[in-house]
Amino acid sequence: MWRAQYPSTGREGHPPVVVVFNPGIRTGPQALKNRMNTVMELTRLVWSGSYHGAGGGYGAEERDGYYGYADAIPLLFSTLDRLQSSGPRTAVWWRCGHGQWETLPDALANPADHDAWYARDEQRRRQREEAEPRRQQEWAAERERWTQEPDPAPEPEPVPPCERCGLPITGPPGEDAEFAPPEDGRHCPACRTDLRQYTSLRETLFGRRQRSK
């Protein structure tokens, strides 16, 4: 019925409902506040709207969303003494869900609706577009740096093991092979030394074996 009787307000939701409290002289500030809080809590499902998680856009890490007020009834509070002293065009309206005294246009606005989310998402999109050339330059500089880096040195060939003891043929690291017999390509310095001593001992005991012609 109200849609047929009144022109469109351009705002989402039903027409607002205004509650004007008249505390009188016997109701103190705290009692008035308690009464307003009671009405606000009892009607929360009517004026709070429904939350929709819309994300922060493609590739965004932050979460974002908006409140839909298509089925909500804006609920505004005021007091008779505020209206009498300041008039209805000043910040004498308390919109449930806003949390502060506002002028009537500000109180009727929906700062957390889909339009507000869309404006934030457009701002994020512009920021991503502005940052894209800088990212492209950073990636190009990184690729250029990779192409200029020298190739890594080839890994050394594996050291063959000693045929006698199985340790590396070069001997343990740090071992002084200066007094070991010459390399034979088969034994480590320690084994070459042992083999020479064994050969010398055998020749001492049994004499040098004559090679057959």
Image: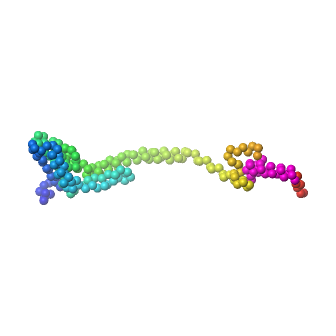
| 156 left or right of 95 in image | right
Query: Residue drawn at (77%, 50%), measured in percent from left and top?
Result: 194
Q: Residue furthest bottom?
A: 1
Residue 133 shown left or right of residue 74 in the figure: right
Residue found 13% across the figure and 59% down from its top: 1
Question: Position of 206 compared to 51: left or right?
Answer: right
Location of residue 8 (image quadrant): bottom left
Front-most of 169 and 14?
169
Residue 98 visible within the image: yes
| Residue 49 vs residue 161, the one in the foreground | 161
Residue 48 or 115: which is nearer the viewer? 48
Residue at 16% from the left image edge and 54% from the top image edge = 15
User: Which of the 4 image quadrants contains residue 43?
Assistant: bottom left
Q: Is residue 178 left or right of residue 23?
A: right
* Residue 203 is inside the magenta segment: yes
Please give the range of residues in magenta.
181-206
Q: Give the x, y percent position of residue 107.
A: 19, 47
